[in-house]
Amino acid sequence: MTALGCVCASLYIGLYPMNSISIAGALGCLTAQQLHIAWSDLLTEAKYSESIRKRPKRGSDLISYIWGGVSIAQFASVATVGILIEFASARGVFALASIPCALGLFVGILNLLEERRAEGSPLLKLNCDKIRQYSNYMALVFILTGISLTLAVLGIVSTDTRLNCIVAVSLGVLVFLSFFALADPLVAKTNTFFLLCACCYVSIEGATFYFFTDTPSQYPDGPHFSATFYTTGIGLVASSTSVFGIWMYNRYFSTSKYRTIFLVNGIVWTTINLISCAVFLRWNLKVGIPDELFVLGSQALQQMVLQLGWIPGVVLMSHLCHEGMEATMYALMAGSQNLGSNISYFTGAYILEALKVQPSGNEDEGHQFENLWLVAVFSALGGLIPLLFLPLLIPDARPDERLVHR
């Protein structure tokens, strides 16, 4: 159903007369597209969680295969979207997107997820016994939904970054407490670690975008990247090196313990990000490294290390899902990480404002970047905080071992 809605939404935006599309209609179509993406992602995650629980020895191989394919597809999309926009217009890309969206119809028609309907059950039936059995996780669903909606409304109605930061962090603490109160201890601990990772990496993308793309009249000493290089060029490097990161995990770390993998990943990730701060002080130019080369190299290393931590994290979450509750539990844990990223946006906005880093694309705004390096250092060091709790929160096990709920 979501695939059909996505196809119709894509065709509506791409082919319907522009002056006849209302804002509400456009938002509805974009929501339908995102709904299809989210549900497809979630159902796929539930399916491979089920497979990993049955065959834990092949878990890393399965996740690497899936995310390797995702990285290749991302590379293809980033490489072609600019050309498609130029020759088919931005709206034309939406119309063309209906083709891959339509492929989702075959997943349901052919039952590629191998779902089984209970004998004699109607088309839609709630399993009340399972809902009662896992009522604690159902409660978490409502709590997490309420917190997410609260943060969304807060971001729209409030421009007070300090207030937003305090509310966001407070809601994050509420998520921690809710999981420890309602979820299994192993699930609560693991979710806390990943949520900490997301919260502690403070987002400063709003400022770095202007740092890299401001024109000479806006920031004379800046890198002056074109929009094409900043989006397509860096995106291509990120997508291509992701595949290498996945290979590196499978080759060298797939049999290591989770704690070892996350420890190495956290230290290397922080080190790379600290070195990347040099571009904000323009130190790379002093040693003769061009901005383009320095940034592309940093992105390549960051993406490889990101995949090194991402793949075992997905395997670990898959092991934690209860039988028959894979989609719900995966949605809770992945949703918590997304919530942590949203919290990092609020904290990042407050820190940027407090240190007077407020670029907006105005003329002669170079002074706005004087403390950007300091914010970047703070963001990089934040990645070390979750490592302090690593022995307490992450099980002493390997990705190819079956985890037992306690």
Image: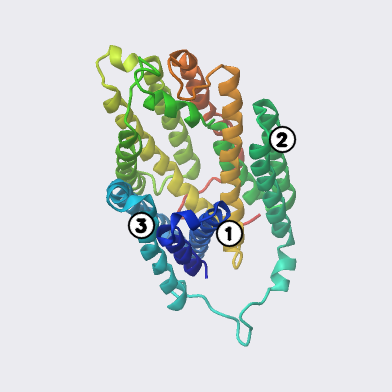
Q: Earlier in the sequence, mark 3 or mark 1?
A: 3
73 vs 268, nearest the viewer: 73
Q: In the current view of this chain or complex, which residue is farthest to the front? A: 19
| SS at circle 3 | helix
Q: Nearer the viewer, mark 2 or mark 3?
A: 2
CB atoms at circles 2 and 3 under 8 Å apart?
no
Whole-number angstrom distance, CA of label 3 to CA of label 1: 20 Å
143 vs 324, nearest the viewer: 143
Tell whether 148 sits left or right of 218.
Answer: right
142 vs 24, nearest the viewer: 24
Whole-number angstrom distance, CA of label 2 to CA of label 3: 38 Å
Figure quadrant of residue 59: bottom left
Label at residue 321: 1
Mark 3 belongs to which amino acid? Tyr
Q: Residues within 10 Å of mark 3 (few under 14, many from 20)?
A: some
Residue 26 % position (x, y): 52, 54
Q: Give the residue at x 37% y 27%.
A: 213
Look at the image and tell me whether residue 254 can be seen: yes
Quadrant showing the C terminus? bottom right
Q: Give the residue at x 46% y 62%.
A: 12
Whole-number angstrom distance, CA of label 1 to CA of label 2: 27 Å
Residue 147 % position (x, y): 69, 46
Q: Which residue is mark 2?
A: 170
Q: Give the residue at x 49% y 44%.
A: 258
Above-or-below relation of 26 to 8 = above
Mark 1 belongs to which amino acid? Cys
Q: Earlier in the sequence, mark 1 or mark 2?
A: 2
Q: Which residue is mark 3?
A: 65
| SS at circle 2 | helix
Q: In the current view of this chain or complex, which residue is farthest to the left? A: 288
